[in-house]
Amino acid sequence: MLKPIRLSELRQLPGQKTQEVRFRQFFAGFESLTPVEGSLRVSHRGHFVEVRAQARTIVTLTCHRCLQQFNHRLELDVEEIILIREPNSGPPPLELELKEEEDLLESLPPNGELDVEDLMRQYLHLEMPTQLPCRPDCPGIVVESAAPAGDPRWAPLAALLKEIS
Ligand SMILES: [Zn+2]
Protein backbone atom coordinates (compact mmCIF):
# COMPACT_ATOMS: atom_id res chain seq x y z
CA MET A 1 0.00 0.00 0.00
CA LEU A 2 1.53 3.31 -1.07
CA LYS A 3 1.17 6.11 1.42
CA PRO A 4 -0.26 9.42 0.20
CA ILE A 5 2.31 12.21 -0.09
CA ARG A 6 1.48 15.43 1.72
CA LEU A 7 2.35 18.54 -0.25
CA SER A 8 3.23 20.39 2.95
CA GLU A 9 5.85 17.75 3.78
CA LEU A 10 7.14 17.56 0.22
CA ARG A 11 7.60 21.33 0.21
CA GLN A 12 9.82 21.13 3.28
CA LEU A 13 12.19 18.51 1.91
CA PRO A 14 15.71 19.87 1.39
CA GLY A 15 17.28 20.27 -2.05
CA GLN A 16 15.14 19.07 -4.92
CA LYS A 17 12.02 18.70 -2.74
CA THR A 18 11.65 15.28 -4.22
CA GLN A 19 10.35 12.08 -2.78
CA GLU A 20 10.90 8.76 -4.47
CA VAL A 21 9.16 5.54 -3.56
CA ARG A 22 9.87 2.09 -4.90
CA PHE A 23 7.20 -0.56 -4.80
CA ARG A 24 6.41 -4.14 -5.68
CA GLN A 25 2.77 -4.91 -5.00
CA PHE A 26 -0.64 -5.69 -6.38
CA PHE A 27 -3.05 -2.79 -6.81
CA ALA A 28 -6.63 -3.17 -5.70
CA GLY A 29 -8.90 -2.67 -8.70
CA PHE A 30 -6.18 -3.59 -11.18
CA GLU A 31 -5.73 -7.21 -12.17
CA SER A 32 -2.21 -8.34 -12.85
CA LEU A 33 -0.59 -11.75 -12.95
CA THR A 34 2.53 -10.62 -11.12
CA PRO A 35 3.03 -7.78 -8.64
CA VAL A 36 3.51 -4.36 -10.18
CA GLU A 37 7.12 -3.34 -9.73
CA GLY A 38 8.37 0.16 -10.15
CA SER A 39 9.07 3.57 -8.78
CA LEU A 40 7.35 6.88 -8.40
CA ARG A 41 9.12 10.21 -8.08
CA VAL A 42 7.26 13.27 -6.93
CA SER A 43 8.86 16.72 -6.96
CA HIS A 44 7.49 19.98 -5.56
CA ARG A 45 8.09 22.76 -8.10
CA GLY A 46 6.36 25.68 -6.43
CA HIS A 47 3.20 26.08 -8.48
CA PHE A 48 3.01 22.48 -9.53
CA VAL A 49 4.03 18.95 -8.72
CA GLU A 50 6.02 16.88 -11.16
CA VAL A 51 5.29 13.17 -11.18
CA ARG A 52 7.40 10.52 -12.89
CA ALA A 53 6.20 6.95 -12.69
CA GLN A 54 7.83 3.84 -14.08
CA ALA A 55 6.40 0.38 -13.62
CA ARG A 56 6.17 -3.06 -15.14
CA THR A 57 4.03 -6.11 -14.62
CA ILE A 58 2.39 -8.93 -16.52
CA VAL A 59 -1.29 -8.81 -17.31
CA THR A 60 -3.67 -11.26 -18.92
CA LEU A 61 -5.41 -9.93 -22.01
CA THR A 62 -7.99 -11.35 -24.37
CA CYS A 63 -6.97 -11.37 -28.01
CA HIS A 64 -9.47 -9.31 -30.01
CA ARG A 65 -9.05 -11.60 -33.02
CA CYS A 66 -9.24 -15.13 -31.66
CA LEU A 67 -10.64 -14.31 -28.19
CA GLN A 68 -7.99 -16.44 -26.49
CA GLN A 69 -6.35 -15.18 -23.34
CA PHE A 70 -2.65 -14.45 -23.38
CA ASN A 71 -0.08 -12.86 -21.11
CA HIS A 72 1.27 -9.46 -21.95
CA ARG A 73 4.18 -7.56 -20.47
CA LEU A 74 2.98 -4.13 -19.47
CA GLU A 75 5.50 -1.33 -19.06
CA LEU A 76 4.77 2.26 -18.34
CA ASP A 77 6.78 5.42 -18.09
CA VAL A 78 4.60 8.40 -17.31
CA GLU A 79 5.36 12.03 -16.61
CA GLU A 80 2.63 14.28 -15.35
CA ILE A 81 2.28 17.81 -14.07
CA ILE A 82 -0.26 18.41 -11.34
CA LEU A 83 -1.10 22.01 -10.59
CA ILE A 84 -1.05 23.26 -7.03
CA ARG A 85 -3.86 25.74 -6.50
CA GLU A 86 -6.95 26.35 -4.51
CA PRO A 87 -10.05 24.91 -6.14
CA ASN A 88 -11.92 27.45 -8.29
CA SER A 89 -9.06 29.92 -8.19
CA GLY A 90 -9.28 30.83 -11.86
CA PRO A 91 -6.93 30.13 -14.74
CA PRO A 92 -3.49 28.60 -14.15
CA PRO A 93 -0.49 30.92 -13.64
CA LEU A 94 0.97 32.45 -16.79
CA GLU A 95 4.18 30.48 -16.73
CA LEU A 96 2.25 27.25 -17.12
CA GLU A 97 0.06 28.26 -20.01
CA LEU A 98 2.56 27.05 -22.56
CA LYS A 99 2.22 23.49 -21.38
CA GLU A 100 -0.22 21.31 -23.16
CA GLU A 101 -3.76 21.48 -21.93
CA GLU A 102 -4.10 17.75 -21.25
CA ASP A 103 -1.16 17.83 -18.89
CA LEU A 104 -3.03 20.22 -16.65
CA LEU A 105 -6.19 18.30 -16.01
CA GLU A 106 -5.40 17.61 -12.40
CA SER A 107 -4.88 20.03 -9.60
CA LEU A 108 -4.33 19.86 -5.87
CA PRO A 109 -4.83 22.42 -3.10
CA PRO A 110 -1.57 23.62 -1.41
CA ASN A 111 -2.43 21.77 1.81
CA GLY A 112 -3.61 18.66 -0.02
CA GLU A 113 -2.03 15.29 -0.44
CA LEU A 114 -1.26 13.21 -3.47
CA ASP A 115 -2.88 9.80 -3.39
CA VAL A 116 -0.04 8.00 -5.15
CA GLU A 117 -1.70 4.60 -4.82
CA ASP A 118 -4.71 5.87 -6.76
CA LEU A 119 -2.48 7.72 -9.22
CA MET A 120 -0.54 4.54 -10.01
CA ARG A 121 -3.77 2.64 -10.49
CA GLN A 122 -4.94 5.27 -12.98
CA TYR A 123 -1.65 5.10 -14.89
CA LEU A 124 -1.89 1.32 -15.05
CA HIS A 125 -5.43 1.40 -16.39
CA LEU A 126 -4.48 4.01 -18.99
CA GLU A 127 -1.59 1.85 -20.14
CA MET A 128 -3.73 -1.23 -20.69
CA PRO A 129 -3.82 -1.89 -24.42
CA THR A 130 -7.14 -2.38 -26.13
CA GLN A 131 -7.48 -4.52 -29.23
CA LEU A 132 -4.16 -6.27 -29.04
CA PRO A 133 -3.71 -9.55 -30.95
CA CYS A 134 -2.14 -12.48 -29.06
CA ARG A 135 0.57 -12.50 -31.72
CA PRO A 136 1.10 -10.34 -34.82
CA ASP A 137 0.02 -13.09 -37.21
CA CYS A 138 -2.99 -14.29 -35.19
CA PRO A 139 -5.42 -15.63 -37.80
CA GLY A 140 -8.45 -14.86 -35.68
CA ILE A 141 -11.29 -17.28 -35.28
CA VAL A 142 -10.94 -19.74 -38.10
CA VAL A 143 -14.23 -20.89 -39.51
CA GLU A 144 -14.73 -24.54 -40.40
CA SER A 145 -15.01 -23.94 -44.15
CA ALA A 146 -11.48 -22.56 -44.22
CA ALA A 147 -10.14 -25.95 -43.21
CA PRO A 148 -11.01 -28.54 -45.85
CA ALA A 149 -11.14 -31.98 -44.34
CA GLY A 150 -8.37 -34.36 -45.32
CA ASP A 151 -5.74 -31.76 -46.09
CA PRO A 152 -2.89 -32.48 -43.67
CA ARG A 153 -1.66 -28.90 -43.87
CA TRP A 154 -4.73 -27.84 -41.94
CA ALA A 155 -4.28 -30.37 -39.17
CA PRO A 156 -2.64 -27.97 -36.69
CA LEU A 157 -5.44 -25.48 -37.26
CA ALA A 158 -8.07 -28.11 -36.74
CA ALA A 159 -6.41 -29.08 -33.47
CA LEU A 160 -6.34 -25.45 -32.42
CA LEU A 161 -10.03 -25.08 -33.27
CA LYS A 162 -10.82 -28.06 -31.11
CA GLU A 163 -8.89 -26.48 -28.27
CA ILE A 164 -10.82 -23.22 -28.55
CA SER A 165 -14.26 -24.81 -28.60
ZN1 LIG B 1 -5.30 -14.30 -31.16
Image (cartoon, helix red, strand yellow):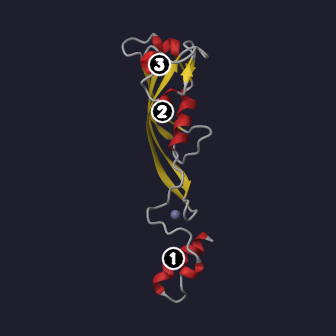
Single out the mark in the foreground, 3 or 2: 3
Residue extending farthest bottom: 150
Mark 1 residue CB less than 8 A from any atom of ligand 1 = no
Mark 2 nearby-residue class (10 Å; few <14, some 14–19, many ≥20):
some
What mark, if any, has residue 157 been given in the picture? 1
Looking at numbered disc 2 in the image, what kind of residue is underneath it? Phe
Separation (CA) of disc 1 from disc 3 = 56 Å
Quarter of the figure that contains the C terminus: bottom right
What mark, if any, has residue 48 been given in the picture? 3
Q: Does the image show residue 2?
A: no
Between discs 1 and 3, the one toward the N terminus = 3
Between discs 2 and 1, the one toward the N terminus = 2
Between discs 3 and 2, the one toward the N terminus = 2
x and y percent of residue 98 in the render? 42, 24
Which is more toward the observer, 24 or 115? 115
Report the residue marked by disc 2. 23
Q: Does the image show residue 120?
A: yes
